[in-house]
């Protein structure tokens, strides 16, 4: 671990420790007073991050805004997950017109989601996203999700997003160390934290540790329709250079959930790699 990495981790720890201890049990309404909307919002996150089920996640996020059609953050999550360009463009236009109504916390999350929607719209129209705009989006996500995670440490999924952006911006070691430092005991039993830790350990070359996380994940997620364990195992096979076994697993994931964008991308790369063997 470099001195730069150590210094960055110290800054993260200090920033979290400096938060008022009264924040530890803070809960947030995410911008809606509708309990059912909030339930399905959390369900959407659970499905995509813990269980690896993208279609079920989209169903849940759409259900959330059925209960509260004016909920800005809920609409932004539908905008992020939909594959329909026209729908996403309409949602983004609506959000641009109404974003001034959001509370400070909701706006901090909304701003990141809207940039993600803009980037997806550009891709859908064949317009390249510049390196500068991508970098700005990634840094804003790290800043805003990090601030939210500090204020609401019991939140499971915005903290997960923060860790993902730490990974993208600073690499696997910072992300893994941050995950271990910031996750609560309960969060460390959830699908995202186990599967992401396994993937980060793999990236760092720690096969035994990755397999240990994968074993716990399999013990915790016993429903055969949950796809996170298959994706982690596929990544383990890739690290072992067992590309056919990885491809077979990813094919199973895509067959179960044709909207699983990570699996679809992995499926394409594996087919190309197998063809070139």
Image: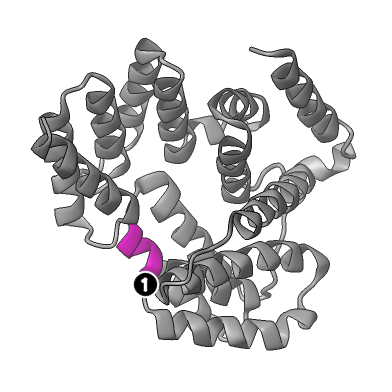
* Residue 55 part of the magenta-drawn span: yes
Bounds of the magenta span? 53-58
Is residue 249 at least partly visible in the picture?
no
* Residue 204 part of the magenta-drawn span: no
Residue in the picture at 49% in, 65% down:
128
Residue in the picture at 54% in, 27% down:
172
Of residues 109 and 183, the one drawn nearer to the viewer in this rendering: 109
The picture quadrant where one finds residue 11 is top right
Where is residue 243 drawn, in percent x and y?
16, 30
Is residue 115 at least partly visible in the picture?
yes
Of residues 203 and 73, the one drawn nearer to the viewer in this rendering: 203
Quick one: quadrant of the N terminus? top right
In this rendering, the answer to whether 261 lies above or below 125 is above
| Other residues around mark 1 within 10 Å, as few (<14) / some (14–19) / many (≥20) | some
Quick one: quadrant of the C terminus? top left
Badge 1 marks a residue whose secondary structure is loop
In this rendering, the answer to whether 209 lies above or below 77 is above
Of residues 140 and 24, the one drawn nearer to the viewer in this rendering: 140
Residue in the picture at 20% in, 22% down:
241
Secondary structure predominantly adopted by residues drawn in magenta: helix
What residue sits right under mark 1 in the picture? 83
Where is residue 86 drawn, in percent x and y?
42, 86
Q: As drawn, is 128 to the left or to the right of 82?
A: right
Where is residue 104 drawn, in percent x and y?
82, 67
Residue in the picture at 70% in, 49% down:
139
Of residues 5 and 161, the one drawn nearer to the viewer in this rendering: 5
The picture quadrant where one finds residue 184 is top right
Where is residue 254 drawn, in percent x and y?
19, 53
């Amino acid at each position: 671990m470099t001195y730069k990495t150590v210094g960055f981790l110290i800054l993260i720890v200090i920033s979290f420790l400096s938060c008022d201890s009264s924040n530890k049990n803070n809960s947030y309404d995410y911008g809606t007073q509708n309990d059912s909307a909030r339930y399905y919002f959390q369900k959407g996150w659970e499905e995509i991050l813990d269980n690896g089920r993208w279609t079920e996640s989209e169903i849940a996020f759409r259900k959330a805004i059925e209960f509260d059609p004016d909920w800005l953050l809920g609409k932004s999550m539908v905008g992020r997950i939909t594959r329909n360009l026209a729908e996403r463009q309409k949602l983004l236009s609506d959000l641009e017109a109404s974003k001034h109504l959001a509370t400070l916390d909701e706006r901090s999350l909304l701003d990141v989601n809207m940039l993600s929607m803009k980037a997806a719209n550009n891709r859908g129209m064949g317009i390249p996203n510049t390196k500068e705009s991508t970098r700005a989006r990634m840094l804003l996500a790290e800043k805003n999700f990090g601030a939210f995670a500090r204020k609401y440490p019991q939140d499971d999924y915005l903290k997960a997003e923060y860790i993902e952006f730490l990974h993208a911006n600073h690499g696997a070691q910072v992300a893994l160390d941050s995950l271990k430092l910031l996750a609560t005991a309960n969060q460390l039993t959830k699908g995202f934290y186990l599967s992401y830790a396994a993937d980060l350990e793999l990236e760092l070359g720690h096969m035994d540790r990755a397999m240990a996380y994968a074993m716990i994940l399999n013990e915790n997620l016993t429903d055969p329709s949950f796809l996170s364990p298959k994706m982690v195992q596929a990544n383990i096979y890739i690290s072992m250079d067992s590309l056919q076994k990885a491809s077979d697993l990813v094919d199973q994931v895509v067959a179960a959930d044709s909207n699983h964008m990570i699996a679809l991308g992995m499926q394409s790369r594996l087919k190309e790699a197998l063809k070139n063997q």
